[in-house]
Image (tube, grey):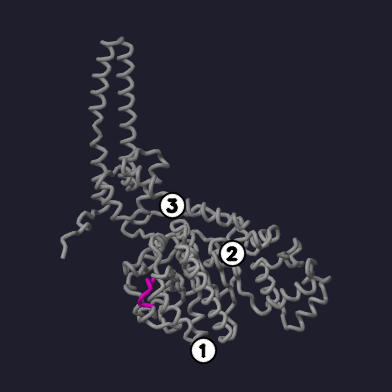
Amino acid sequence: MTRFNPEKNRKTPEQWSAKALDATKNNHLQWNVIGGLVLGALAASAASPLTGGLIVAYFLWDSWKKAGEIQRNQAAITEVGCVAQVLDGDDFADYSRQVGHVAVLEELRFATERNLALSTAAADFLENYSPVLSTSSNLMTTAKTLLGKAGLQVKVESSEEIYINPDDRFDIIASMTDRISNSFILGISGTGKGIVVSNALRAAKVKHPKLKTFYIDPKHDEKEQGYTAGVADVIKRYKCETEEPLIVVAWLEKCLEEFNEYAKANDANSERTLLILDEGTVLGLKSKIAKSTILLDRLSSLTSLGDSSGKNIWFIAQTPFVGGSGIDLSASSQLVTIALVSAENRGSLDQWKRSAMVKKLNNIDEYIEKSPVSRAVFFGKTAKWYPMSKLENYSGYDRDSRKSVEGAATIRQQLEAAFSKKKISEQPEQNIFLSQSAQLIFDWLQTNRKEQWVKYKGSDRDMSFIKFLSQNNIKGEDKEDAIFELLDAGKIEIADDDSTIKIIVE
């Protein structure tokens, strides 16, 4: 039993403002003026009246300048509630613990942008924490750097600034990445799971340089590949939605075997490996139909034993009802639940109320209204809901409007630009499992058109290639998907006319 209770120092926003105003009043400016007069008098008697006058003038000017800075800080406190920059010592530590490092950093950014004076503790915090907490600046710069190494260019716009009560502030990205934990990330389609995971991946890479990531993507949606391009170390993609359950299970089993080998090699080098398993609901349903326990077996092993061997998992699904995801409650109870709800799908909450994984659903509307993106997020470690903050969309596609982000190149355009200029050996490792159609096309090109351009669409198409496609029943959309798979994997390059391809000779 302990009497330790740091929460006793919690204060309301009004109390913190009063504390900050008190700090600005304890400025000792009168001693600054008196000291200047004394030094001026001594200098006048020892040197000359002119020297003494200059010293007195300097101290008066310095005091006037500091008084102006204090008045500007007081205005920031009373008008917008910016208090962190003037708090010092224990007061600063208590305030930081109460509102969180991200909230403090936002206030200090506000203060530095307006050249407000900072306390010693505030200046130290800004220097020590800014590199890892700067989600709107540092992480976007890091993401640009990572994508730049892959030859990709992505337009990044600054986030909208919206004031939220400090008691409602919550940094889901920091909470997911300060310490990597096994997590169950859920939300129906369009709630922003991909945006959260893509931002968390970039933050995790910054905070944990030795972290390796292995991404399994059963959706293989071109519009969403910007989430992971140039960031995930290994990517496995396959369009599982319309595929036979046995084929999906075979693909998943192969991916998981490769993950185990990859994680084992990383562990030998003292590196952790994070498995991101997307579209868990689809994989779970396919596994159940195929009467396979592969998903449950591997998930149970990872959550029970993986942490000690350097392995963690983020399992992403659309429903909190774990039976629908092919797993049982004994496995999911060892995962930190992160749930997302948007204003467009509040109706799903009526069903979620029956779930044991997500609690306290009654006041979600309040958090959705406070969110700049009209979403609420639940974090299992605190068992609370919060307004969702605005995060960077790395996909170039807005799911709310169902339109491409204006001015942002599509991921296909980015990949075409990158791979048409660079050989696969120059790209980050992205081992992509090819579909049967893609593998057939690759084998034909390698055998029949090595180092030759092949026109695969248009009036002057290569008829031998078209005949091959027909014989193997590769038509229309399947052909385009297979071509993109090969392009994504760096197996082929595409000409400027967007209709001629050539195999890349390694």
Disc 2 marks a residue whose amino acid type is Glu
Q: Secondary structure at mark 1?
A: helix
Q: Is residue 352 above or below residue 114?
A: below
Q: Is residue 166 above or below residue 195?
A: above
> Disc 1 versus disc 3: distance between alpha carbons?
45 Å
> Disc 2 versus disc 1: distance between alpha carbons?
33 Å
Out of 32 and 12, give the one closest to the viewer: 32
According to the picture, the residue beneath numbered tag 2 turns out to be 429
Which of label 2 and label 1 is nearer to you?
2
According to the picture, the residue beneath numbered tag 3 turns out to be 134
Residue in the image at 57% along x and 72% along y: 236
Q: Secondary structure at mark 2?
A: loop
Disc 1 marks a residue whose amino acid type is Ile
Left or right of 198 on screen, residue 306: left
Residue 495 is situated, as x and y percent measured from the top left of the image, at 75, 62
According to the picture, the residue beneath numbered tag 1 turns out to be 289
Give, as a single range, the part of the protein colored magenta.
Answer: 332-337
Q: Residue furthest front?
A: 268
Residue 451 is situated, as x and y percent measured from the top left of the image, at 78, 66
Left or right of 448 on screen, residue 342: left
| Residue 153 appearing in the image | yes
Q: Earlier in the sequence, mark 2 or mark 3?
A: 3
On the rendered image, what quadrant is the C terminus found in?
Answer: bottom right
Q: Secondary structure at mark 3?
A: loop
On the rendered image, what quadrant is the N terminus found in?
Answer: bottom left
Out of 286 and 206, give the one closest to the viewer: 206
